[in-house]
Amino acid sequence: MDAIEKDLLLKIADLHGVPEGAYNIRANGELGGRNTTANIDVVTKTDGKSGIDIFIKPGTKNESMHIPVIISKAGLQEVVYNDFYIGEDADVVIVAGCGIHNCGGVEMTSRHDGVHTFYVGKNAKVKYVEKHYGQGDGNGKNVMNPETVVHLDEGAYMEMETTQIKGIDSSKRITKADMKTGANFIVKEKLYTHGTQTVDTDFVVDMNGEKCRADIVSRSVAADQSTQRFVSTMNGNAPCYGHTECDAIIMDKASVVASPCLAANDVEAELIHEAAIGKIAGEQLIKLMTLGLTEKEAEEQIIQGFLK
């Protein structure tokens, strides 16, 4: 890898080089490296689609899987399909993410659409970490459209930590989940937009089994003339508990829309939504400025703390 690709890998996956354990690195539309283990297998798709199938054996514990994507070739546009089959009673961490470096000029758009589908077996536990990051000369466009589909079997647990760091001009983020009895689904989303960037986030969660629980929390900061739209739909189709929350800081001339939607289709479904949009409190700025920070430095400290 060259210096740019190594920097992207560090930004999106906290990797200083080739990771340990199982991994699949995609670089500029091609396989950049792969490793499997006794419990985690990675297979290139053979159905005509671009992407991979990941098979994690039942009972696998304390193992990780890294699947970063890096694009440093200006103008590259791709759609990738990755399917994850997590066996019963497994407990694993999956680290994904995409980094784009685009210096191709005003008319050049680099784009990555990633469709990830998870089949999480009975009583299995998955932590999924995904970061998106873009950089370049500011002329070309960086576009990312992640779609995540989650199928949780009985007693399954999945935690998603998704972060859009910076430099993504346009993003449509779709997450769909269906849950069986006793399943748990937790999402922690963090977004930061600036300039004229736009991001649309859509969650749809179907809670179909008794005692399943879903907790969707999105924190975002919209600066400059950027636009954010958050939609979260929870369908309580059984005795269940669901919570969805959007908490946003708006700055400058940005725009934020939050639309939580709840549908209770069972008398024992307990569903809660929260949405808050507001500017940085003046007293917070004043307090930090009395400690010697400039107004801009104070804003940055507050934003970092909010998105931490």
Image: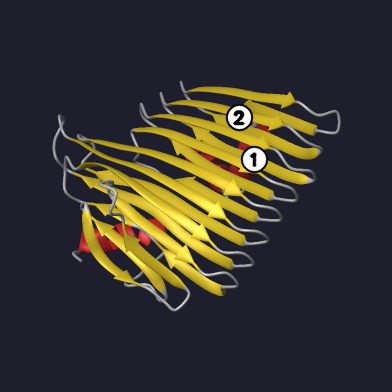
Q: Quarter of the image holding residue 218?
A: top right
Q: Which mark is on residue 232? A: 2
- Comparing 2 with 58, the one in front is 58
Task: Check the image and report above or below for 199 versus 97.
Answer: above
Amino acid carrying label 1: it is Ile
Task: Check the image and report above or below for 39 versus 159.
Answer: below
Q: Do the residues labelled 1 and 2 touch (CB within 8 Å)?
A: yes
Q: Which mark is on residue 235? A: none
Amino acid carrying label 2: it is Ser
Left or right of 163, for residue 138:
left
- Comparing 18 with 126, the one in front is 126
Image x and y of residue 144, in percent: 35, 39
Image x and y of residue 275, in percent: 67, 28
Image x and y of residue 160, in percent: 56, 51
Label 1 to label 2: alpha-carbon separation: 8 Å
Residue 305 in sight: no
- Residue at 26% from the left image edge and 68% from the top image edge: 33
Task: Check the image and report above or below for 277 versus 47.
Answer: above
Q: Mark 1 points at which residue?
A: 216
- Comparing 27 with 40, the one in front is 40
- Residue at 43% from the left image edge and 47% from the top image edge: 116
Task: Check the image and report above or below for 139 versus 60.
Answer: above
